[in-house]
Image (tube, rainbow, N blue to C red):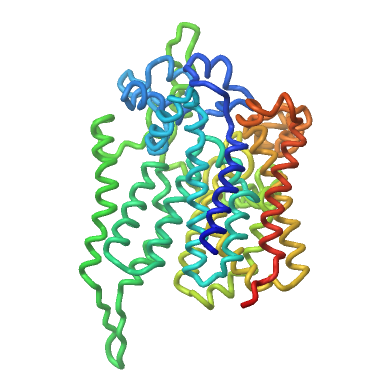
Amino acid sequence: MKKLIIFILVLFVSIIFAFTIKGNYGNPTPSNIYDNQRFMGQPFELSPERGRYALTMSLAEDHSFFLKHDIARIVTPDLGFYKGKYTLLVSPGLSMLGVPFYLLGAGFNLAQVFTFGMPAFFAVLNFLLILKICKQLGISFRGAVLGGLSYLFATTSFVYSVSYYQHQTTTFLLLATAALLFGKKSVLRFGIAAFLAGFSFWIDSQNPIFFIPLIFYAIQSILNVQKDKTFTRIFLNARYLFAAVGIVVALGAYSLYSLAVFARPFQLSGTLTSIKDFDQNNAPIIKTLSTQKDTSRFFNTRRMTNGFATLVFNEDRGTIYYAPIILIGILGVCQLIKKKYNESVAVLGTILFIFVLYTMWGDPWGGWAFGPRYLIPLFAFAAVFIGQAVDIFREKILFKLAFILLFAWGVAINLLGALTTNQVPPKVEAVALGMKWNYLLNWDLYQKGLSSSFFYKTYLSSILTLEVFYISIFVSIIAAAGLTLFLPERTK
């Protein structure tokens, strides 16, 4: 019965994503992207989507990590320059993973839509991994489902599941590593986990930092500590040392890639010479040295106060505005620590590492973006504590009402973003431009009936208002969570 329910849930969330994936019909050319699809509400409205898609297109069509001029033109200002060639200023992993989706979609004249569907594919896998981890930590199936649904639809995870960003892939690598380590101990499982940690560098160069708590969990779980009155002895099963081969393979492969492309073993794409734009003669305009990126300045502890306020309280990116359901998870922390101490500390540590790192980040707003996009992996791990909170308080009617209200708010806000635009300026820029800086901008587009959804624009816009489409999806999601929360336990 449980397997059938999981199948129905996977089908349900897949349909929701299919309805909301951003896109237009066709296989867009670089000139079409540049001329028509770089604007608000279009699939390539922001440089992160354009850049990663450009590299995917180059790998699929030209079999090259370097971009031809017509493709490079759509990437600015995230365009790098190396020895007269154009490349991307972000890690290449997501673009590489997108190639099979691009090629499959191209056969149906839907290359862009299929490629943008890759994050949704990983989001579904993340939902299944949350269910798995909750089971490993002794959380009920009901709690696990509500935690998973909260992550998918009541946080900014929703918005970045339907556009071409790296966050769902990073989340998958972290959750998969946790699921492997929390399960039965074996050299093979630890080796795969080590590979995933190393491969995360391909997706985003700072990602390996997030794996540190899980790595410490893995180390302590294979140590045998014996104490007596005189000595403390620590024994290590030497065969687990072979698991380190996984991370060596992943990072070694990156080194080979970097040597082949840049003639350096570990060249960070973000430190390359940066192209600001092209002039009227299509010659590259190189950024001045003062604006070039320096890895030593990516993180700064002096930014933590501002970063904390931005990611938690501020109206333009604050979690309490975009994903208040996360507050429910706080209620489950103490109980889960008592029940599964080592695993809970690893989960909390991962949350802490993600949060602290991005409070020190030079751009905690994530550029022009919808909500706190950097915290999406954090939300996935917080979903575990949401599941535990449900187990503790699910018989309390006040808890149920609070849960469904916070869940409904999160869904309402993030569905609005998923169906309209990610191109939301931070307040520090919006004020000078006379623009709105949070989901009120999305509300304006919604009221005008402007949607980025491929499915709605292609099949429904002529017969259905955006309001009806929005309400239909919203009610469906709330109904799924409500049934899970309020249905009584089965009696034997």
Is residue 355 in view? no
Q: Quadrant of residue 484?
A: bottom right
**Residue 138 visible in the shown view:** yes
User: In this rendering, is residue 106 above or below 364?
Assistant: above
Q: Image height check: is 374 above or below 420?
A: below
Determine the residue positioned at 30% across, 21% down.
Answer: 83
In this rendering, the answer to whether 79 lies above or below 407 is above
Percent across and percent down for residue 457 are 65, 26
- Report the residue at 42% width, 30% height from top: 104
Question: Image point 71% across, 49% down: which residue?
Answer: 321
**Left or right: 288 in relation to 454:** left
Quadrant housing the N terminus: bottom right
User: Hey, which quadrant is residue 394 in on the image?
Assistant: bottom right
84 and 138: which is toward the camera: 138
Q: How many marks?
A: 0
Percent from the top left, x then y, of residue 199?
35, 47
Q: Position of residue 239 (x, y in %)?
A: 21, 67
287 and 106: which one is in front?
Answer: 106
Residue extending farthest bottom? 229
**Where is residue 364 drawn, in percent x and y?**
57, 43
In depth, the one of 405 and 113 nearer the eye is: 113
Q: Where is the C terminus found, in terms of image quarters?
A: bottom right
Q: Residue at x 58, y 53 (%)?
A: 9
